[in-house]
Image (tube, helix red, strand yellow):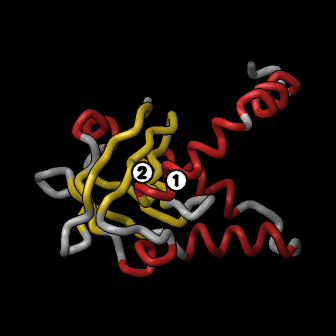
Amino acid sequence: MFIGEYQHSIDPKKRLALPSKFRGELGTRVVVTRGLDRSLSVYPMKVWEELAGKLGSLPIGETGTRSFTRLMLAGATDCELDAQGRVLIPEYLKTGAGLSKEVTVVGLYNRLEIWDAKEWQKYKHQAEKNTEKIANELGKLGVY
């Protein structure tokens, strides 16, 4: 399980060292793709295969599902972690997520998200202001 947030830097060769505590569970290969809210998502291969199967089975006749599937699958890249646990972030993903040198890696149960550090702080601050509303919505779903 991936939890927590970690500050890291993207090096000049566009490599990002993933948090060492996650590397065992991630394995040697991951998929990096566009995430939501201008972030990137990092999936262990098993989790990605399950998600890709679900996306691939969505009805292509619906504009929204077709667009979302295109963005997620076409934007995905299969990455091998090097000996230092680094992944190469392709330029199109780095630019699309607005990543600068300083990033925050966020553990979200079965995946990681990569955020520009300043954008993560803004997002987190906004979410914290809405905690009561979010808790009420989760309560309606029986989660909280």
In the figure, is residue 114 to the left or right of 53? left
Mark 1 neighbour density, 10 Å: few (under 14) some (14–19) many (20 or more): few
Q: Quadrant of the C terminus?
A: top right
Between 87 and 37, the residue placed more toward the observer is: 37
Location of residue 84 in the rendering, given as x and y in whole percent from the top left corner: 13, 52
Q: Quadrant of residue 80?
A: bottom left
Q: CA distance from mark 1 to mark 2?
A: 6 Å
Q: Quadrant of residue 15?
A: bottom left
At 22% from the left and 39% from the top, the residue drawn is 20
The secondary structure type at the circle numbered 1 is helix
Mark 2 neighbour density, 10 Å: few (under 14) some (14–19) many (20 or more): some
The residue indicated by pointer 2 is 45
Label 1 with label 2: CB-CB less than 8 Å:
yes
At 51% from the left and 34% from the top, the residue drawn is 109
The residue indicated by pointer 1 is 49
Location of residue 74 in the rendering, given as x and y in whole percent from the top left corner: 55, 76
Q: Which mark is residue 83?
A: none
Say which amino acid is labelled 2: Met
Say which amino acid is labelled 1: Glu
At 37% from the left and 80% from the top, the residue drawn is 91
